Amino acid sequence: MAVSRTRRLAQGLALTLLVALAIWHYLLRHYDLILPPALLASALLVSIPLQRLGRLRQPLADYLLLLGVFGLFAIEAPDMEHGMLWLGLPIVTSFLLLAAPLALLLGVVAVPVWLALLGDTHVTWVNLGLGWWLVLAMAGVAIRLAKRELHHDHAPPSRRQGLSGEELRRGLKTEVARAQALSRPLSVLVLYVPQLEHVDDQFGNRLRQALSTTFGEQIALNSRHSDLFGEPQSHVFWLIMPNAEETGAAVAGRRLAEAVATIARPETGSLESLHRVCSLRPDETAAAFTQRLHNAANKLLEPKV
């Protein structure tokens, strides 16, 4: 299951803070206060792997973490000398885990409740205004980050999903002509992901399509905008790299293999990307180069002895 960067950040920070808080109480011999952060940290240690493996639904994990943070605030903050510093904990966590409009509404409504938990002396117009200002500031930051993440993750469909076989062959002909006219290098990475072939046979096209989409997103994030990517034949992909020497394309292939290995599902494990590099030879025609690419693909498809 894909987990967004903001949620990974929230989970990592929460786990670190909870462990640090439990250790802090232990060192100060506040044994009665160790249990809440220790239990929450244990719950996170269990839920994070289950969430990554798709065994725990994302909203459920978020709500459990949010409720745990609210409970921790209610237990810890009232006994602190500077309890107002704790006010930022539930506000920031809400914006990390919830959609900005929902977190904004929750913050506006809950700020008076959190101040009341800190004690009657904290329920003042100054503190109320400060809490609402913090909520509005976090809303602005969350909206800005959401726009940046949306722009970063939503590459053009041709880069995320790949070009069709016909578009890819036309693009290859164009790049061959350009490379020869300008005396520039041209390399192509021929990629093969064995799990995509096996999962189609064992689990059907739906899982295969989901993995292919994630694979295409990794290619888009780890390649240049000038590169052309697509699936000219079943289970085989081309990454056409203009102005790339063979050594540079080989380095890119190793980098892509590392990125693809981060894609994992319980049914397939981590994906494996096998590749071969083909570079355009002087005076080689587009047809001859295409044939070499098909030969390289056939070598990748040969069963290992």
Image (spheres, rainbow, N blue to C red):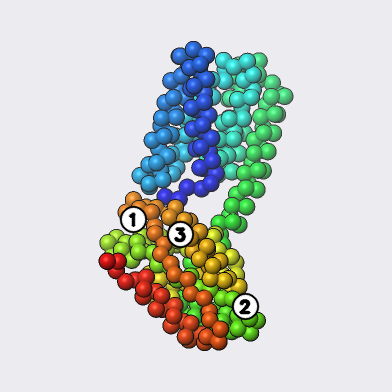
The residue sitting at 46% across, 81% down in the picture is 290
Of tags 3 and 1, which is closer to the observer?
A: 3
Is 60 drawn above or below residue 271 in the view shown?
above
Q: Position of residue 279 (x, y in %)?
A: 52, 76
Q: Which residue is mark 2?
A: 184
The residue sitting at 60% across, 67% down in the picture is 225
Q: Position of residue 74 (x, y in %)?
A: 53, 22
Q: Which residue is mark 1?
A: 268
- Determine whether, in the image, residue 165 is placed left or right of residue 101: left
- Nearest to the observer: residue 215 or residue 282: 282
Snapshot quadrant of residue 191: bottom left
Residue at the extreme top of the image, as rendered: 29
Amino acid carrying label 1: it is Thr
Q: Do the residues under discs 3 and 2 have CB atoms within 8 angstroms?
A: no
The local crowd at label 3, few if under 14, some if 14 to 19, many if 20 or more residues have their Cα within 10 Å, is many
Kindly state the secondary structure of the residue where label 1 is placed.
loop
Q: Do the residues under discs 2 and 1 have CB atoms within 8 angstroms?
A: no
Amino acid carrying label 2: it is Arg
Measured in 3D between alpha carbons, the distance from the residue under mark 2 to the one under mark 1, in whole angstroms, is 40 Å
Measured in 3D between alpha carbons, the distance from the residue under mark 3 to the one under mark 1, in whole angstroms, is 16 Å
Snapshot quadrant of residue 90: top right
Q: Which residue is mark 3?
A: 257
Kindly state the secondary structure of the residue where label 2 is placed.
loop
Amino acid carrying label 3: it is Ala
- Determine whether, in the image, residue 48 is placed left or right of residue 118: left
The local crowd at label 2, few if under 14, some if 14 to 19, many if 20 or more residues have their Cα within 10 Å, is some
Q: Do the residues under discs 3 and 1 have CB atoms within 8 angstroms?
A: no
